[in-house]
Image: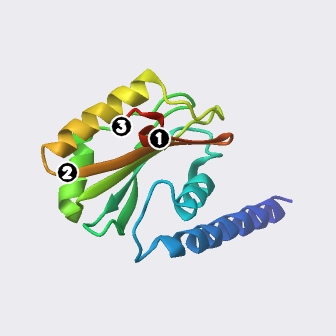
Amino acid sequence: MLDGSIEVEQTFLSFRRAMTQMLRAPLMQRPILSSDQFVLDYLRAQMAYDPIERFRVLFLNAGNELIADEVMGVGTVSAVQAWPREILKRCLDLEATALLLVHNHPSGCSKPSPADRDLTERIVKAASSLSVIVHDHLVVARKGTTSFRMAGYL
């Protein structure tokens, strides 16, 4: 019986990897905008149903094309910590000129918390000192996505 459940799990993991590749493909070699439906679909598939919070950064070049998509913090069911210093260090390593910040809320509600807004302000301040643009911070949840820029937080 155990072998059957392992096969089912492997099938689901393979399916998830294939879906990730299919959703990520349209993001390559084109400008990334936080309001782009391809971006929102990709992030929703990656994060909306995670049982714990994850903080990821999409690192972009001068043409706003994706250089890297990396998880920069793994948290708990209700919090995640990310460090501006580490994000900007990675940004410099990749020679990125812009960032799209993203994290998920396992609760299902995409409303940013005061801690989310504080972290975003600290990252934006650190990035601006290095002439790096933070395009947006998206909070992804089962019930929707909130853009800091559209909500007036950025």
Read off the residue under disc 3: 154
Q: Is residue 122 above or below residue 24?
A: above
Is residue 98 visible in the rendered image? The answer is yes
Residue located farthest toward the left when viewing the structure as drawn: 129
Cα–Cα span, label 3 and label 2: 22 Å
Q: CA distance from mark 2 to mark 1?
A: 27 Å
- Name the residue beneath numbered marker 2: 89
Q: Quadrant of the N terminus?
A: bottom right
Tell which tag, 2 or 1, sits nearer the viewer: 1
Q: Residue at x 57, y 31 (%)?
A: 77
Total labels: the figure holds: 3
> Which residue in the structure is indicated by mark 1?
150
Q: Earlier in the sequence, mark 3 or mark 2?
A: 2
Give the image location of residue 142, x and y in percent: 67, 42
Residue at 13% across / 49% down in the picture?
A: 130
Hey, which quadrant is residue 67 in on the image?
Answer: bottom left
Q: Amino acid at mark 3?
A: Leu
Counting other residues with Cα less than 10 Å from the Cα at mark 3, is it few (<14), some (14-19), or many (20 or more)?
some
Tell me the amino acid under the disc marked 1. Met
Q: Circle 2 — which element?
A: helix
User: Which mark, by number, is residue 20?
Assistant: none
Mark 2: few, some, or many residues within 10 Å (few <14, many ≥20)?
few
Residue at 63% across / 73% down in the picture? 18
N-term-proximal mark, 2 vs 1: 2
Left or right side of 39 for 154: left
